[in-house]
Image (tube, grey):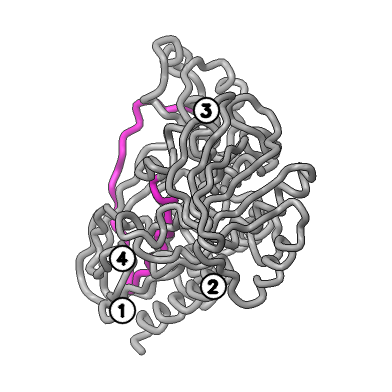
Amino acid sequence: MSNAILVVGGGFAGLTAAIEAAELGHDVYIVEKSPWLGGRVAQLNKYFPKLCPPSCGLEIQFQRIRKNPRIKFFTLAEVTGLSGSKGNYVAKVRLSPRRTAPHSVDLGLLSATLEGETPSEFDLGLSSRKPLYKPMPFAFPARYVLDVDHLTRSDKARVAGARFLFPSEEPKDIELNVGAVVVATGWKPYDVTRLSNLGAGAVKNCVSNMQLERLASACGPTRGRIQRPTDGRAPHDVAFVQCAGSRDRNHLNYCSYICCMATFKQCLYMAEQHPEARMTVFYIDLRAPGRYVKVLEKVQALPNVSFVKGKVADVVQAEGDRVTLTVEDAVRGEKLTLTYDLVVLATGMQPSLAGGTMPLPMPVDEDGFVAGGEDAGIFAAGCARMPLDVTRTAQSATAAALKAVQTVQGR
């Protein structure tokens, strides 16, 4: 039997599971498809329960990884196959080329001279990045990535002879011998462009809740200023549209658990930065589990926040880059037409496995959540199992790590 454990996914759940298993004396391999570790938490402005920036919690995890020789991680990597059986697996991993030197060279000056640009994945399209870029401000590993697909002709000439760059580097495959697997593939925001009636992707100044997190972040595209994407103006009237795609049989048939709490948090962002702004939250039901009810009560006490129970039916472009909503006020029994400077869609949490393929012998349900596999020594953690907040994600990851440890120990 192999004593090693494979962790698929390097977000908060994957990092937690890897550290817990390694500190119990097991070799751990983290395989993460993005260029950085940290997952969705890294893209947030603040996260519960303490409402601290992501660098706070993640930096602690990164330090523990640096100091533990039992943990090896691979970024820009994906599992392409798994053969064998419980206790004795061979995982095939495809490593995509980073095309930069394997140490933290500052390539910022060279990057600034390049002409090519493409929308930033980390900023969810709210900014652009160069083809030579560091994935995020506190990236771990702190290495640049060379994206040859977005180099202009003159860019190619600049990087051809540059030190520490390897434009012709090719993908390579490796094999890892492991006894158990933790699947911590996380979640992705629901594709807002599918919410055509809510204006996503077509109506100006209509953003998703994750995009608002990037606008509020000090390391985001606006250096933390919450403003309208079109003109940079501070919004005076803001609408939050709850259950944007969730609890809808045509999109996500379940409650995404965190959307209400994300909106309450963002109301606090807005009230702190723009105390004169008026905010309206349109909701079906409000969910604030456990101690989080205190956050809801705090937001409800704000004089410039109002709550309307009713489902938004339509979002369209108005004059002056404003946004008009059509909504039913379920309490008063009225149909309302209201116009705002900025509309925020509380888009749902969808498992990253939804709509894709995973070369592991484990079942997923119709929504893409892992629904088994423990008999084979494969354990799901975090939002690969169900929608969770960060606290419950950490608990889930610890549980998965302990099960994996018991598996490789033959218990």
Q: Is residue 55 visible to the viewer in this orientation of the structure? A: no
Say whether disc 4 or disc 1 marks the residue closer to the N-terminus.
4
Q: Residues within 10 Å of mark 4 (few under 14, many from 20)?
A: many
Q: Amino acid at mark 1?
A: Glu
Kindly report the distance in space between the C-alpha atoms of the residues bearing marks 2 and 4: 30 Å
Comparing labels 1 and 2, the label whose residue is closer to the camera: 2
Say whether disc 2 or disc 3 marks the residue closer to the N-terminus.
3
Q: Is residue 212 above or below residue 397?
A: above
Say whether disc 2 or disc 4 marks the residue closer to the N-terminus.
4
Kindly report the distance in space between the C-alpha atoms of the residues bearing marks 1 and 2: 20 Å
Q: Which residue is mark 2?
A: 392
Kindly report the distance in space between the C-alpha atoms of the residues bearing marks 1 and 3: 42 Å
Comparing labels 4 and 1, the label whose residue is closer to the camera: 1
Comparing labels 3 and 4, the label whose residue is closer to the camera: 3
Quadrant position of the C terminus in the picture: bottom left
The residue depicted at 52 percent of the width and 54 percent of the height is 334
Q: Residues within 10 Å of mark 1 (few under 14, many from 20)?
A: some
Q: Residue 203: give x, y in percent of width and height.
A: 47, 33
Q: Which mark is residue 177?
A: 4
Q: Amino acid at mark 2?
A: Arg
Q: Nearer the viewer, residue 393 or 264?
A: 264
Q: Is residue 98 magenta?
A: no
Kindly report the distance in space between the C-alpha atoms of the residues bearing marks 4 and 1: 18 Å
Q: Amino acid at mark 4?
A: Asn
Location of residue 386 (image quadrant): bottom left
Q: Are marks 2 and 3 in contact (CB under 8 Å)?
A: no
Q: Residue 44: give x, y in percent of width and height.
A: 60, 50
Q: Which residue is mark 1?
A: 374
